[in-house]
Image (spheres, rainbow, N blue to C red):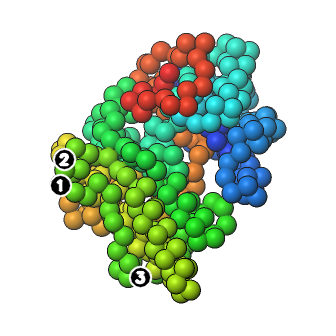
Amino acid sequence: MTAEPLILGIESTCDETGVALVRDRELLADVTATSMDQHARYGGIIPEIASRAHLESFLPTMRAALEKAGVDLDQVDAIACAAGPGLVGSLTVGISAAKALAASLNKPLYGVNHVIGHLAVDELVDGPFPDHFVGLIVSGGHSNLLDVHNIATDVRELGGTLDDAAGEAFDKVGRMLGTPYPGGPHVDRLAQAGNKKAIRFPRGLASSKDKNAHRYDFSFSGLKTAVARYVEGLEQAGRQVPAEDVCAGFSEAVNDSLTAKAVLAAQDLGCSTIVVGGGYSANSRLRELLSARAQSAGLEVRLPPLRFCTDNGAQIAAIGSALVREGVEPSDPSFGPDSGLSLSVARV
């Protein structure tokens, strides 16, 4: 029997350089290099630094992945790389490397949707997806609900954030409270030590009008402003800011919205499964609250292991493998980076 195709996945959307090898739904190797420490001093991602870091990291990362998988480059059957969404400079480095490899090896190339890859990576852990599920994407740049019948060929965006994404809002609140960069994990840690009922912050799009017009959408900018006003009011009054309780109340507001709408979407569409992906899916309260609400509603939740929450090559190889299994044609060789790539297409 002929072996399943071996897919090389290349991730370079932001500050992680990831290379992975996947055969069908089996992960053979996943190696990641990050430039996060270089950005910490600036309190955010510097695109030029990220692009240069990809240039320096790509070859060592690819060689390490090949060695870990125990395969040679000429054994690769197809190459997948992130085509978007992401930073244009970072994407360009990965796409250029992938095109050079594909041309030199005479292998098909797939420019894939990095965000949909956040869901696809779950197949490497929990096996094949059901015929129909709701995807909840939560990261620094995305908070979206997707209606998925086939991860490679049939994905429809139900809704998304109208302003800040959940991870972005967490980082901004962390900055207000003086936590190190990135703020999200620190806010999560503080929230675990706080009283989530001590401060009730507003939920976005909670009015009857908004519930109808934005049934599957999110909004966190108003919540972020409410936190800022609360903190500023205490500081101006010379009072100590209860950071743990602020973080707990803020976290509860974000996760209440995310989990309630994910469960609502699954019930509306008649799905029995919610698949979660993205960096923010590492948030402890999101995982706890969504699992509890899904269980009460009779739904299954598939949450990624923490190592697959942040950007990685495995997610790119996973969506590439799904495209190959479905017989989807490779991308046109002329494709370029698309920072605003639609979440309804798995490949460009």
User: Which label's residue is closer to the chain start, 3 or 2?
Assistant: 3
**Residue contact at pointers 1 and 2, CB within 8 angstroms:** yes
Q: Which amino acid type corresponds to the residue marked 3 in the rendered image? A: Asn
Q: Position of residue 13 (x, y in %)?
A: 62, 38
Is label 3 in a helix, a strand or a loop?
loop
Q: Position of residue 192 (x, y in %)?
A: 48, 77
Q: Which amino acid type corresponds to the residue marked 1 in the rendered image? A: Ser
Judging by the rendered image, the residue that carries numbered circle 2 is 212
Is label 2 in a helix, a strand or a loop?
helix
**Residue contact at pointers 3 and 1, CB within 8 angstroms:** no
Residue drawn 64% across the image and 42% down it:
14
- Is residue 25 visible from the viewing direction of this image? no
Residue 75 drawn above or below residue 187:
above
Q: Residues within 10 Å of mark 3 (few under 14, many from 20)?
A: some
**Residue contact at pointers 3 and 2, CB within 8 angstroms:** no
Q: Mark number for residue 208?
A: 1
Q: Position of residue 163 (x, y in %)?
A: 43, 47
Front label number (3 vs 2): 2
- Is residue 55 visible from the viewing direction of this image? yes
Judging by the rendered image, the residue that carries numbered circle 3 is 195
User: Which label's residue is closer to the chain start, 3 or 1?
Assistant: 3
Furthest-bottom residue in this view: 239
Q: Mark number for residue 253?
A: none
Residue drawn 70% across the image and 14% down it:
103
Which one is nearer the viewer's eye here, 18 or 254?
254
Q: Which amino acid type corresponds to the residue marked 2 in the rendered image? A: Asn
